[in-house]
Amino acid sequence: MADKKYDYFFGRGSAEGNARMKDLLGGKGANLAEMTNLGIPVPPGFTISTEVCTYYYEKNKRYPEGLKEAVIGNMAKVEEIMGRKFGDSERPLLVSVRSGARASMPGMMDTVLNLGLNDETVKGMVKLSGNERFAYDSYRRFVQMYGDVVLGLKPESQDEEDPFEIVIEKKKREKGVKQDTELDAGDLKDLVAGFKGLIKERLGITFPEDPWEQLWGAIGAVFSSWHNQRAITYRKLNNIPEHWGTAVNVQAMVFGNMGDDSATGVAFTRDPSTGEKVFFGEFLINAQGEDVVAGTRTPQPLRKSDKKGGLPSLEELMPEIYKELEDVYKKLEAHYKDMQDIEFTIEQGRLWILQTRNGKRTVRAAIKIAVDMVKEGLIDEKTAVLRIDPDLLDTILHPTLDPKAERNVIARGLPASPGAAVGEVVFTADEAEAIVRDGKKVILVRIETSPEDIHGMHVSEGILTARGGMTSHAAVVARGMGKCCVSGCGDININYAEGVFTAGGTTVRRGDMITLDGTAGEVMVGAVPTVQPELSGDFAALMEWVDKFRRLRVRANADTPGDAGLARSFGAEGIGLCRTEHMFFDGDRIKAVREMILANDIEGRKGALAKLLPMQKGDFKEIFKEMKDLPVTIRLLDPPLHEFLPRTDVEIREAANDMGRAYEEIKSKTDSLMEFNPMLGHRGCRLGVTYPEIYEMQVKAIMEAACELTNEGYKIIPEIMVPLVSMVSELSFLKVHIKQVCKEVMDRYGVGIEYAIGTMIELPRAALIADKIAGEAEFFSFGTNDLTQTCFGLSRDDSGNFLPYYIEKGLLERDPFVAIDRSGVGALVKIGADKGRKVRPNMKLGICGEHGGEPSSVEFCHNLGLNYVSCSPYRVPVARLAAAHAALK
Amino acid sequence: MADKKYDYFFGRGSAEGNARMKDLLGGKGANLAEMTNLGIPVPPGFTISTEVCTYYYEKNKRYPEGLKEAVIGNMAKVEEIMGRKFGDSERPLLVSVRSGARASMPGMMDTVLNLGLNDETVKGMVKLSGNERFAYDSYRRFVQMYGDVVLGLKPESQDEEDPFEIVIEKKKREKGVKQDTELDAGDLKDLVAGFKGLIKERLGITFPEDPWEQLWGAIGAVFSSWHNQRAITYRKLNNIPEHWGTAVNVQAMVFGNMGDDSATGVAFTRDPSTGEKVFFGEFLINAQGEDVVAGTRTPQPLRKSDKKGGLPSLEELMPEIYKELEDVYKKLEAHYKDMQDIEFTIEQGRLWILQTRNGKRTVRAAIKIAVDMVKEGLIDEKTAVLRIDPDLLDTILHPTLDPKAERNVIARGLPASPGAAVGEVVFTADEAEAIVRDGKKVILVRIETSPEDIHGMHVSEGILTARGGMTSHAAVVARGMGKCCVSGCGDININYAEGVFTAGGTTVRRGDMITLDGTAGEVMVGAVPTVQPELSGDFAALMEWVDKFRRLRVRANADTPGDAGLARSFGAEGIGLCRTEHMFFDGDRIKAVREMILANDIEGRKGALAKLLPMQKGDFKEIFKEMKDLPVTIRLLDPPLHEFLPRTDVEIREAANDMGRAYEEIKSKTDSLMEFNPMLGHRGCRLGVTYPEIYEMQVKAIMEAACELTNEGYKIIPEIMVPLVSMVSELSFLKVHIKQVCKEVMDRYGVGIEYAIGTMIELPRAALIADKIAGEAEFFSFGTNDLTQTCFGLSRDDSGNFLPYYIEKGLLERDPFVAIDRSGVGALVKIGADKGRKVRPNMKLGICGEHGGEPSSVEFCHNLGLNYVSCSPYRVPVARLAAAHAALK
């Protein structure tokens, strides 16, 4: 065994390991070796390999022969480089002992810092730092950590406080102080003694003063922590094999608080907020990392040109070190080919790099950095595309609040639909319409919204609701419209009657100005200034590459010409879902719709439908024009009819008056249309089957619009979509009617239009018999919203009562209405797609619904080989990017 | 071609064909040949084979060489046997010309009767029958039929009346009569002339007087009718190949109205109403078949011992013929091995058998006949079992109305749950309870029922609702309880306030006696006497064989000890579904349930649950006792909590009073529990996850009951079933709690019980991830009711608005809530069963829900290899029989 190598040194520009030796050295060890080899001044140390861990467990916690000698030899090299000595009372070397497995297991295993301190060496630390308090604070921290991690002095039950903390608390009471920082060097010295006494008393062990005994204790503790309960559970959940084992890294400690020639800081290789290619960061003289984090002292800039206040920059104070740091930055960016976030310490005039990692950045910065790096030849376009997280892209597409503006937040709700909105408070949809007509902007505030509020939501800048989750009506519709929405804002109390809402102590009246931040879920009084998104420049360049790589097409869900135009500007390649029912609520139309529904016979219904025809046709013409040359999928009427009906007694009376009919008659008809489970009720193509004249009117409107525009020279590609099909007979039946109307209209206009008739696959049965349905349907659009509802037996509107609890308890990872559930809903989509393609190999397949703009769902659709996803206009760039990611992965 | 045989003679005891030659002779021709060969006196004739049909179409409506001669030869043989001559004016032979394909195509092709009549031969018929009116009536019918079928004189459009009928109408107006029967021989003679004139005028054709021309015309018309539109559509729908073709049967006509030595009648080889082994039937002297049907003359009995009135029997009037008929009956039963329904005619002292077929019979008769025939050695037990239609068995299991009693039917609704019920009218569930407590019987009359009415339904004899379909709440619950129910009875108008309902002109008040017939869907005033079902004797013998053949086990859905006992008496082999929520409605329990739901915190909830524990435990003990030694599957609480809450303002006030809490508080809590789609809401195991204490109480009640009975010496097999699982995490989470409670209870009692924990598979997702769920569940019960709802996206409660229309329009063959939908829901059950068994090969699989007692669904379950079906107690014998059928098929 002795000839086998178990230890891997790193330091002073060369290492025995490298980045490819992760299996043996763990992630951390391999990375330290790699950085050392790059010439980065990493504090020296060595890694004990994962094979020792395996040996340690196999051989009942013994170490392989020769390891002891190897550790001694490595320590000597570290001492030499650092100019310190382990256990020395003049210039003591302190080390850290850390775990490091092949896969990252953050916080799961143990670490010991400041190892090497004892009653003698602490004196050396006092001398070196000139800071007695610091030395004893380090000492007491080490004893505490070692007592816990290595010796195992822990609370005996969950209820017991940490025993070391009890000693500290006692000390503070004695001294009459509240903060740990108020304890002086003498107090800390007392604590060290107190801790050691506690260990002796509770464990019967004398705290080891011998640094070597400390070192072996810590190495053993780190290996043992591979088998602690937390780590075992973590490995199970993350599929990390038991046999991998962990490595142990022993590394010299360096200190930024060893006098005025010492410092500690953080540096970014580019500006993480704007992405600008400038060396950027902060530091503190004579300080430790935690001082930077604590924010008690104002950090100084690295670059001279970054100086804001009067504090000198590193560039000025330590020009040599600054140069060295710049050199490190160049090496690291060249090596990792990404913007780095670097932690550094200067110890008595020597620069040490403690850590480097890919730096966090804003989405805007991420795009600029990726595009710049392509220009610099550092990365290729694929890499650039993969650098941008589609989940975050959304945030830069909406107008946002000026980050510099002041915010007076009075309530918080759910960030239901991103963006910012400013407007006057209104409490009803009608009010919203009326005030907007006067040229003002409004925020619609409701306890919750219903389909009746749609016309008000359309004209509002944003929506605020007191009830309802991330997938409530308000949230879903607002996201669809790309409107800012804060939902489920329990902080506010709405009083419709008086036209006010209160939030905490603030009362907001109808007409008062408020601001919503849909990204943060905040409600503010007054008008906070906003900034518009910038979609050209780097963004445009990136999206061009995105489109080059993706296979999946991206369409938009758009019901209005405005949405269609917006979608096109975001790069939509067609409309995948144009809901015709939203058009039914606008203005006076709802009256004709109600007349149609409440008609006593087919003649009455046809009369009302005749009034609606020109309105629908007008809508379609505008939408078609916006989307010329691109396909537009129009879904025929879907929701249950009672959604269009008046609800309250007052509304019913009004409607009866309008129609010149008796209240009782309207009331009884309305009641008879109510359903126990409207989601599973008389809707979708079931309406088309029982009232064929409704779909006939809609198809007529679509085809007349298409024919008239064709005559004007437009190329129109209408796709007529039948919703909620569960039996092939429904589609066969309706198709006959639809084709007949299409033919009649085209003959009348003397125009030939290539239209398609397809169906939603949004019920489990439709997916299961998709082969039969494909015999009739020319395309499928998977309605994953409804498919999720029926597959799970889960009403989106009602799920708020328990789904959050499921997620909180870990029974469910993500809301299935947000990210597609692959094993259930996804399985149905796959069955449907496979069966459909078996019968009609070139069938166009897509999904519409909320999932179409969610990156992991987009990836799923790409993997299934669907042709397109369709999502709300603002999500189009997200879906494009996600599609490129999926194709590149 | 001339040497090929195209014609097959039958007559006088021997035939050229036989029963195995269906392909060539068609079903009818083969059967006529077979009967002839058996020595049955069938009127002679011949069959022109299906090959001629093929030839006829291939050769542009020409016949093969030699056919003409063959027909002439065959006709000569017929003439000889009948002692008549074709075209003779003294003793004319008349023939029928009928189609006959391989597969039965009833009513699809053409037939010509009385062929051979003309102005000369009609005179012969006058002489032979001594009945001029009859002869001319036959003649005018022949001309009319020939004119239509062979010559093609039909109405020119759908709106036009039949042209022959116009001539008849004119004649009747002339004579000032209303009925065809009021026309005399002279009038009929005029009609013949009129018809011929019409044919000449409209078609330019002279009606053929030559019988041979008539014959070839009719043969050609029958072959041509193979290609009429009706027949083509029928073949498409029934998968009958075009190339099969039809045969043509030419057969001598015989007449039962040729004097007092002629007669016509119908005979059954056993009594079709009781099944008794007696020769049974009726006849009329000097009459035709239609006279028997018309009922204008009272038919006479065949047997002397059947004589009721003063009319002589055939046995007395024509002892020789009677003997011959008895001989025929013995031959036919021995041959067909089933009870036969025989049509016979006696023409001038000669017996002719026109038709024999398996006779229709009541279910009771069917059972007796099958059991008797086994005893007689005529059939084996398998055949006997297969003879009984499971779909009809249900009708003899319930008490029924005495068929002899008078009925005063005032309204008709849907036959929602079979059986009969007599009782006083009540309009609320509470009223029902109160009156039953006084020892009276009641019928609960509601506009529709809801779960709140359960306690009233339990105590009622039957349920009558004005609204709701075959699968409405009332219908489903009533069937589950085995209670008679008439639902959707739109004929009645209920006025709760005045405590009356009206039906047509009748007013029925609270307390009035009414009778329901749930099998016919009838409502009667007054008490109609009922008869109890007889389940021993033949029924018991049959069911013993049934149990020998079936593989599938049959359990019952039973929620009460009464239902459990009933189920056991019907042969249930366990309880497959014991719903715990029905127990929650009984008596004072609902108060504790409401207290539990409306509790403000977990303590309040636990307090209320503690009150429920002893009640649930008591229920379980009684049910367990009834089902000792058999498994009992208990489903934990399933429905959404708001089903248990008060609804109306009055009820809410009352509940608030009971609990000593404010109305507003209870009202607001009740409102907050309302859901948009309760079917997809906070129910099933979602309740168990969010309120673990509810399931804990239920499991405690189950296990305490089981332990206490075990200590008393019973063997108890509890199976704890978790409803509405859609994620495996739900089951894992709940299982921990359930097992813990089970262990705690068993430890406390010092008893070990083999219990199982399983789950409903009632959501598409559960079926799709059944492999994962099987890792946790010890058994699956497929809840096909909910699976149908979610698979189709179809609410059972709301489907009444459109499903009937679907069925009417032919978009759907059968209500999927009645017979399992094989391609959708069935596919999910199959996926679930396969995936479950893959992980747990010996897993117990069953279905519960309405489908468990429906024969075609039972067959499906058998084919899938499930272990059992579970159905309502009254359906248990049906399911047993259906399971045997499935196994034997």
Image (spheres, coloured by chain):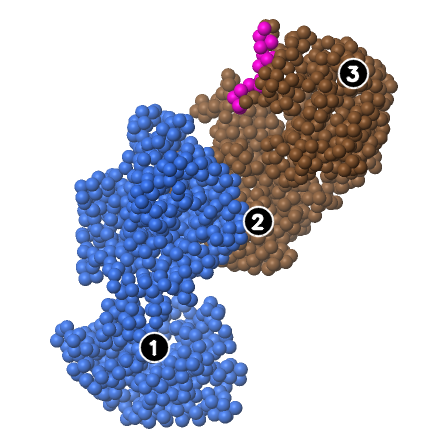
Chain colours: A brown, B blue
Q: Residue at x 40, y 84 (%)?
A: B18
Q: Residue at x 36, y 63 (%)?
A: B548
Task: Find disc 1 in the rendering and name its residue.
Answer: B336
Q: Residue at x 50, y 86 (%)?
A: B62
- Across and down, in percent, residue A715 comes to 66, 51
Which numbered circle lies on residue B13? none
Q: Give the amino acid type for the residue marked by disc 3 in the picture.
A: Asp
The N terminus of chain A sits in image quarter: top right
Vertical relation: A166 (above or below) A565? above
Does residue A446 appear left or right of residue B521 in this picture? right
Q: Measure how far apart labels 2 and 3 are at the Cα level.
A: 66 Å
Does residue B90 appear left or right of residue B107 in this picture? left
The secondary structure type at the circle numbered 3 is loop
Report the number of numbered marks.
3
Query: Which residues are drawn in magenta?
Result: A157-174
- Across and down, in percent, residue A541 comes to 76, 38
Nearer to the camera, A472 or A872 = A472
Secondary structure that dominates the magenta span: helix
Mark 2 surroundings within 10 Å by alpha-carbon count, few (fewer than 14), some (14 through 19), many (20 or more): some
- Across and down, in percent, residue B559 comes to 33, 45
Q: Give the amino acid type for the residue marked by disc 2 in the picture.
A: Ala
Residue A106 visible from this viewpoint: no
Both labels 1 and 3 in a single chain = no
Q: Residue at x 54, y 35 (%)?
A: A810
Front label number (1 vs 3): 3
Front label number (2 vs 3): 3
Q: Give the amino acid type for the residue marked by disc 1 in the picture.
A: Tyr
Which numbered circle lies on residue A88? 3
Task: Find disc 2 in the rendering and name its residue.
Answer: A827
